[in-house]
Amino acid sequence: MFTVLVTLDVLPERLDEFLTGIRVNSRASRNDEPGCLRFDVYRSLEDPCRFVLHEIYRDQAAFYEQHRSTPHYAVWREVSARCVRPGGHVNSFLTPAFLEDMPELSHVEVER
């Protein structure tokens, strides 16, 4: 299992465009990519222009090869380039320490 946490600081004047773009990307990722197990979008309570994406993929290939080669990801990259503040994009790559404590995903055959 491969998890990506993405922190994004959005330009206030581009907030509506960002919200539309990330909604399209997250829904297409969940609905059209068999290797995408979760794609949640969170908005900070302290800063309405800060977002965290919580993405879970079956394995690294599902993220790096399948997800990043989709048409919706290419469109998302363009939206992100316009809407995210320069220097306001941080990726963290993770794997669950206790997969057995994630019952909603424990049935999935994954790379560890």
Image (cartoon, rainbow, N blue to C red):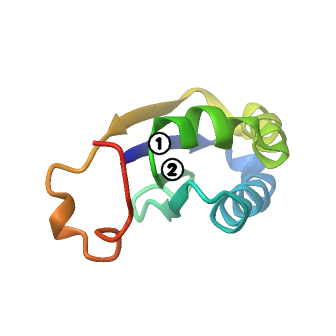
Q: Nearer the viewer, mark 1 or mark 2?
A: 1
The residue under the point 34% across, 76% down is 104
Which amino acid type corresponds to the residue marked 1 in the rendered image?
A: Thr
**Could you say whether the residue bearing mark 2 is in a helix, strand or loop?**
strand
Crowding near the residue tagged with mark 2, few <14, some 14–19, many ≥20 C-alpha atoms within 10 Å? some
Work out whether residue 105 or residue 13 is closer to the camera in this orientation and state it.
Answer: 105
Q: Nearer the viewer, residue 40 or 98?
A: 98
In the image, is residue 31 above or below residue 76? below
The residue tagged 2 is: 50
- According to the picture, the residue beneath numbered tag 1 turns out to be 7
Give me the residue at 37% from left, 51% from top.
Answer: 110
> Percent x, y for residue 84?
66, 37
User: In the drawing, does residue 64 fall left or right of residue 7?
Assistant: right
Image quadrant containing the C terminus: top left
Most foreground residue, 74 or 105: 105
Residue type, label 2: Arg
Task: Looking at the image, tell me whether mark 1 or mark 2 is earlier in sequence order.
Answer: 1
Q: Residues within 10 Å of mark 1 (few under 14, many from 20)?
A: some
Question: Where 31 falls versus 86 (above or below)?
Answer: below
Image side of residue 108 versus residue 37, left or right: left
Q: Are marks 1 and 2 in contact (CB under 8 Å)?
A: yes
